[in-house]
Amino acid sequence: SQTIHQWPATLVQPVGSPLSLECTVEGTSNPNLYWYRQAAGRGLQLLFYSVGIGQISSEVPQNLSASRPQDRQFILSSKKLLLSDSGFYLCAWSLVAGNSPLHFGNGTRLTVT
Amino acid sequence: QKEVEQDPGPLSVPEGAIVSLNCTYSNSAFQYFMWYRQYSRKGPELLMYTYSSGNKEDGRFTAQVDKSSKYISLFIRDSQPSDSATYLCAMSRQGAQKLVFGQGTRLTINP
């Protein structure tokens, strides 16, 4: 069966510091990978998605970037965090065929102070 | 106008009640419909996945799609306190790589 791992679960970082959140998927090959952000009391905002190694689509221009160095690894980064980057970050995967449901990790709660 | 509208609630009902959660949408091209349950500080968990119109039942949960009205529903029978969570609807077009999510409805089941 497929599993998704996301870490860390909680992170407190000062403004201006770098960020690296990692997500890995096990039990499937060539998945679609996604990064979402969820602000308190609000819906899911798609940040990036990837349909293959090195292929990244950005949905919202912002202070973040994503990379996919390996088939089942997805990384969310920032060079300098802003207060507005605080939120709940979720990684998800789906089968490469269209219309497959997403399967989410348990998220990283990021607080920028 | 948002592509998917979902009342954020909060919705509070007594234990044992039948709960109805709903989403409306504007894009008639949507064909795949999902419901997710999200507990506090956790990622969303897939509850139901349906294609096109009709009903799908899984235990106490029933998903209903009415494409003519652009309206989907999730019914929870014999609701339990453990059903207290935020419920998100999601949908996609044929061949789409991305889902469109509703805002989520926060549900509380009172013992």
Image: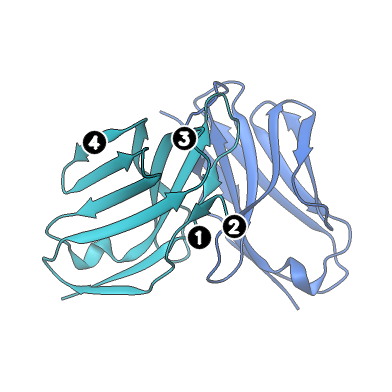
Q: Earlier in the sequence, mark 1 or mark 2?
A: 2
- Name above or below for residue A88 compared with residue B24: below
Which corner quadrant of the image does residue B96 belong to? top right
**Residue named by callout 3:** A101
Query: Dot 3: what SS?
Result: loop
Chain hosting mark 1: B
Between B38 and B97, the one lying in front of the other is: B97
Q: Earlier in the sequence, mark 4 or mark 1?
A: 4
Foreground mark, 3 or 2, reads 2
Residue B68 image point, x, y percent: 36, 38
Question: x, y percentage for residue B8?
Answer: 44, 68
Dot 1, crowdedness within 10 Å: few (<14), some or many (≥20)? many
Label 4 amino acid?
A: Lys
Which residue is located at x 42 percent, y 65 percent? B7
Q: How many marks?
A: 4
Residue toward you, B73 or B79: B73
Q: On screen, A49 above or below A37?
A: above
Question: Chain drawn cyan, letter?
Answer: B
User: Which dot, 1 or 3, sits closer to the camera?
Assistant: 1
For the residues bearing labels 1 and 2, Cβ distance under 8 angstroms? no
Local crowd at mark 3 within 10 Å, few (<14), some, or many (≥20)?
many
Closer to us: mark 1 or mark 2? Answer: 2
Residue under label 1: B103
Left or right position of A83 against B43: right
Residue that badge 4 annotates: B56
Q: In terms of secondary structure, where does tag 4 sit? A: strand
N-terminal of the pair, mark 2 or mark 4, is 2
Residue at numbered disc 2: B1
Q: Disc 3 or disc 4, which is closer to the eye?
A: 4
Q: How far across and how far down the image is residue A110, in percent?
A: 66, 66
Mark 3 is on which residue type? Pro
